[in-house]
Image (spheres, rainbow, N blue to C red):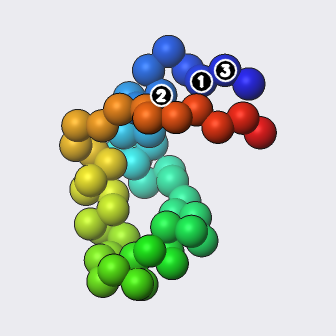
Amino acid sequence: MALPEKPTHVIQQLVELRRNRIGWHAVQHMFEEGFEAEDLLQALQGNMKVLEELRD
């Protein structure tokens, strides 16, 4: 499945609408590194780019 034309924009819209889910892998890092869900969501709303597209 191909990514939308601007996947980062789609992600930011979903975060803004609070229509997102934080996956287990991210939760593990949050716990280990001492940051909270709000920190992660704020980071997603900043400048970002797709580094790698993973296939299903």
Q: Quadrant of the C terminus?
A: top right
**Residue wearing tag 1:** 3
Query: Where does the image place residue 9, in percent across and percent down from the top left?
Result: 38, 29
Q: Nearer the viewer, residue 51 or 35?
A: 51
Q: Which residue is mark 3?
A: 2
Amino acid type at mark 1: Leu
**Could you give the CA–CA distance between mark 2 and mark 1, rounded to whole angstroms?**
6 Å
> Which residue ends up furthest to the top in the rendered image?
5
Q: Residue at x 29, y 77 (%)?
A: 35
What residue did someone put label 2 on?
A: 7
Residue at x-position 33% and y-position 80%: 33
Q: What kind of residue is marked 3? A: Ala
Residue at 59 percent of width and 24 percent of height: 3
Establish if 21 lies above or below 29: above
Furthest residue to the front?
52
| Callout 2–callout 1 Cβ contact below 8 Å | yes
Residue 25, percent from left and from top: 56, 68
What is the spatial separation of the Cα atoms under label 3 and label 2, in whole angstroms?
10 Å
| Residue at point 72%, 35% (across, down) | 55
Asked if disc 3 and disc 2 are in contact, CB closer than 8 Å, the reply is no
Residue 13 showing in the rendered view: no
Quadrant for the N terminus, please: top right
Query: In this view of the protein, which residue sits in the foreground, 40 or 17?
Result: 40
Tag 3–tag 1 contact (CB < 8 Å): yes
Residue 32, horizontal then vertical, whole percent: 40, 84
- Dot 3: element: loop
Q: Is residue 29 left or right of residue 34?
A: right
